[in-house]
Image (tube, grey):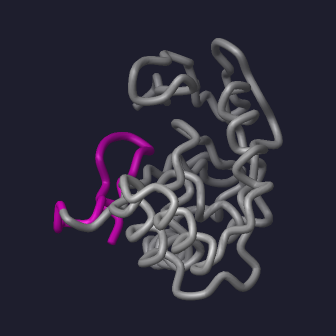
Amino acid sequence: MLRHLAGRVWWYPHHPDPNNVEAGVAVITADGGSVVVDAGIGPVAAGRIRAAIDAAGLPPPRRLVYTHHHWDHTWGACAWPDVEIVGHAAGARLLEAEARRPWSHTYLRAEVEANPRLLASFRARAWAMPTWDGFRVVPPHVEFDDTVTLADGVVAHHVGGGHAPDATVVAVPDS
């Protein structure tokens, strides 16, 4: 369920159980459509987010902004086929490489067998993907290097850092 934070900013919260990987997603309303910040952990989660947007009576999404390239922020993008995706250029290169991998439960198992340290992350990915039908990793359609101001006044600014080289903050100055 979406919670109103301030002004035109809404929040779809992360999973309440810290053992379940599911990042929160922001929704920013605008006259021509909403801006979604991060895509959800997979197509099923993205569907729940889209249903919450509809239930709240918010404008349909027209743009999606990635805060960084990690799977739990981007794997839901394939369930948003009608939106423009904006992301940092470094993240775009990383997502292009991820898109070339043969994602499936078989692939996840093989990768964990080769590197057991991947178990927690890949188990969470498997949980997020009950089916791989129609799944694909989606790099951003629009890339930026430092800062981009979108037509609806939303600002995405690259901050980088240890968590992800493409880490981006999203600001809504009027909210």
Q: Which stretch did the figure color magenta?
A: 1-18
Tell whether 63 sits left or right of 6: right
Q: Nearer the viewer, residue 55 or 116?
A: 116
Residue 82 rendering spot, x and y as whole percentages: 79, 64
Residue 27 rendering spot, x and y as whole percentages: 48, 52
Res. 47 image quadrant: bottom right
Q: Nearer the viewer, residue 138 or 170?
A: 138
Q: In the rendered image of this protein, does residue 61 appear above or below residue 1?
A: above
In the rendered image, residue 101 lying in the magenta stretch gets the answer no
Quadrant for the C terminus, please: top left
Tell whether 63 sits left or right of 38: right
Residue 114 rendering spot, x and y as whole percentages: 51, 60
Q: In the rendered image of this protein, does residue 144 appear above or below residue 68?
A: above
Which residue is at 47% across, 76% downward? 126
In the rendered image, residue 12 lying in the magenta stretch gets the answer yes
Residue 40 rendering spot, x and y as whole percentages: 50, 61
Which residue is at 50% across, 51% downward? 73
